[in-house]
Each structure stands twice: as structure tokens, then as C-alpha cells.
Image (spheres, rainbow, N blue to C red):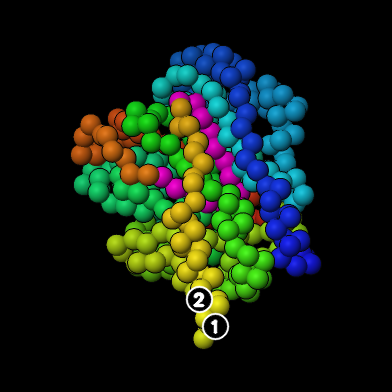
Amino acid sequence: MFKNSADFRQHFNSEQIISLDLSYLSDDIESWWNKEVKIDSGFFAKKISLTHLLLTKITPSDYTIFNNLSRANKFVSGIVLHNLFKIDSSDLALLVHKSLADIFNLIDIKYPYEDHKALYLKKSKKQVGEWGNGSGDISLHSDDLYEDISADYLALTTCRDLSNTPTSYALAKDILNCLTDDELNILLNIEANFISGKNVNGLKIKKHKILEFCEQRGFLCRLDFRIDDFNGQRMTIANENPSKAEIDVFDKLFTISKAISHNTVDNGLGSFLIIDNYKVLHARSNIKYYPSEGYDCPKDAFRLLYRSKGPRKQFFDASNARYFW
């Protein structure tokens, strides 16, 4: 447990995103792919083969950084891998994505009501905001805070992005450092309702503390600043009869989220981003330039990312295995 807000502040201020150039893997990955594409084997067999290749070729120093992701007192909230491959192939990008997700012990959760894997502009949805398959702005948020299963990690792999629309992010500290110690103490005692959006049929609501201590990961921070046309504000204060001070701190969070500068991840071909979903918020500006009204097939899309989100294996409740993708 943290002694006080000052102790907590010192802890979260140590968190960082680490960027690694993995171009030393690209020739091996592409050579493997050029041979593998000619072999009539299934996706699962190809993924096992590629995972083995990656584990053989990743340097010990880089693998140590992989292992530090999200662990208490290691202070690695996210990792960006650049230059993994140079071939524009949706099949290769998906294989690299799934292999790396396995290496990071991310269990990808597939809910029956959403098609979450491929992110691209869907037909007739181009003006929709706060949604990964539309072209509108997406505000800073963490994923799936309304779900029963904890989404510990979020991973994104870029197959292509001809629109040059980077993924942006903010570490929890970027927001929390805008609060005074007194405000941080108040926030430590606030609970919020987290509300589902367009991707869920109906309405799902889950109540959580916004901030809490976590023995395995140091701390958890749950924030969602999206306000959409379907269910409105996606995070509301849950405290019964909140004080004016609590309301003021809660409202200040939304003001901060609009005012702070976002960091950006270059969505270059062959990049892979993985973040602790409870220490890093992500966002995206509106996509201004697109050559069509949307796409039926992800392979044709001018902007295509693959996404995985779900628990880390060590923290997973096996009774939820039906949601595996």
C-alpha cells in the first residue's frame, strides 16, 4: 500500500513507455514468410513456427524488457516495437501480432457481440466517433472497463496506415500530475461507473475504484473520457451523494484530458505497441483522408491495425476460457 498521495506520486512518476528498434529481426521474419507462404499449413501451425523463430532471435536484453512489462517496481507501462517487417501483407501482420501477443502472455478475449480483431474503416460508419472502426475522434480511454474480465493488456500491430493517423497515448502520470496532493487523496477514494459503447448490444455498467494499489503491478488507474452518441459519458461518478470536492476533482479529470498534450506512436508498417491498459490511456484523432466510403474486407483497407486485448495469463480466471479468440 502507498503511505500517502506523495508516496503514490513518486511511484507512478517512475512509469515509462520504452521504444525498441527490432529491425534486426525483419530479414529473418521476411525470409521465414517467403518460405512459409508457399507451404499449405494452417494459421495455428504458422503462428507456432513464427513464435519459435522470434523467441530464438530476440536478444536477451530486449527479452528482459519484455518480461518487465507491467510488473511492480519495474516501471515499464508499455513497449513499442518498430521495424519488425517491411512487407505489406495483412496475413503476415496478423501472424506477427498473434505471435508477439503470445510472447507477452496476453490472452486475447473475443466477446460474442464485437468483431474486435481488425481495426479499419467500415462502410457507412465513416463519421462515427469514439469507435475504432469509424473515422471520428477517439478520446483518451482504457479499454473494456465495463467488462467482467480484466483487460490487463492492449496490443496493436500496424499492417498499413496510408492516412498517416498515429495512435496517441497518455501515461496515467500525465493526468495525475495535474492534480494537487489533496485532489489526489480525494481521487483515491472515488468510485466510477464505466459504461459500454457502440460495440456492445444493450448496456453494460461496471463499478470500480479509479485508483487502487496492486501487489503484482504496483497500481491500477481506470479512466475513460469518451462521450459518444449512443450511451453518452462513458465514465460517471458512482459515489452516493458525492461531496462538492469529489465532483470538482472528477470534473477536473475531464478538463485535464482535453488540455494535455498526447504522445504519439508512429503507425509505420511493422510496428507493434503493447501497453498496460490500467497505466496508459490511448486515443486517436479523426482520420481526415480516406479514398473510399469504407471497406468490406480488411485486406483492402488503407488503414489496417490488428488489436488484442485481455488479461495477462498469470492473472486469468480459467472459467472465462470460452472467450478465447
| Nearer to the camera, 20 or 315 | 20
Residue found at the very far front of the displayed protein: 180
- Examine the rendered structure and indicate whether residue 173 appears above or below residue 193: above
Disc assigned to residue 243: 1
Is residue 146 shown in magenta?
no
Quarter containing the N terminus: bottom right
Is residue 271 shown in magenta?
yes
- Whether the residues at callouts 2 and 1 have beta carbons within 8 Å, the answer is yes
Q: Is residue 147 visible?
A: no
Q: Is residue 18 visible?
A: yes
The amino acid type of the residue labelled 2 equals Ile
- Examine the rendered structure and indicate whether residue 17 appears above or below residue 128: above
**Residue 322: image location, x then y, percent:** 52, 55
**Residue 205: image location, x then y, percent:** 46, 70
State the extent of the magenta-drawn residues as a range: 269-284
At x 49%, y 58%, the residue is 256
